[in-house]
Image (cartoon, rainbow, N blue to C red):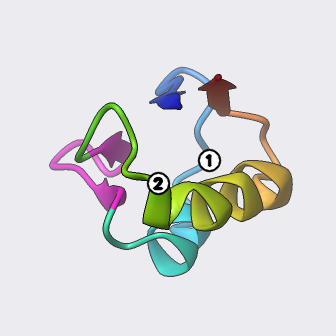
Amino acid sequence: MEVTVDSNVCSACELCADLAPNVFEMGDEGYAVVLVNPVPAEYEDDVRDAADSCASGAIEITE
């Protein structure tokens, strides 16, 4: 699995970083950034939860 965050869409709510802190963090610009790609298998469920919970739809998963 690979994941991206569209910084043009990200609302900077930090929910993804809360749900999957090993994969997302808030960058210097205030928007979420991906820390690791591809996503390790043990974090895939957390990333799916973050993508499903992202109100702005900024997170895209590629299987």
Q: Which residue lies at the image location 71% right of the left edge and 53% below the top edge? A: 48
CB within 8 Å, label 1 to label 2: no
Q: Which residue lies at the image location 37% right of the left edge and 51% below the top edge? A: 40
Task: Give, as a single range, the part of the protein colored magenta.
Answer: 23-34
Q: Is residue 39 magenta?
A: no
**Residue 11, disc:** 1
Q: Is residue 58 left or right of residue 8?
A: right
Q: Quadrant of the C terminus?
A: top right
Residue 12, above or below 4: below
Expressed as whole percent of the image width and height from the top left, the position of residue 51 reads 72, 48
Of 7 and 16, nearer the camera is 16
Near mark 2 (Cα within 10 A), the count class, few <14, some 14-19 or many ≥20, is few
Q: Based on the displayed image, in which of its 4 quarters is residue 13 positioned?
A: bottom right
- The image shows a total of numbered marks equal to 2
Of 1 and 49, nearer the camera is 1
- Mark sitting earlier along the chain (1/2): 1
**Residue 41, disc:** 2
Name the residue at the left extreme: 28
Residue 42, above or below 10: below
Amino acid carrying label 2: it is Ala
User: Callout 2: helix, strand or loop?
Assistant: helix
Expressed as whole percent of the image width and height from the top left, the position of residue 23 reads 36, 57
Near mark 1 (Cα within 10 A), the count class, few <14, some 14-19 or many ≥20, is some
User: Callout 1: helix, strand or loop?
Assistant: loop
Q: Is residue 48 left or right of residue 34?
A: right
Q: Which residue lies at the image location 81% right of the left edge and 61% below the top edge? A: 53
The label nearer to you, 1 versus 2, is 2
Cα distance between the residues tagged 1 and 2? 26 Å
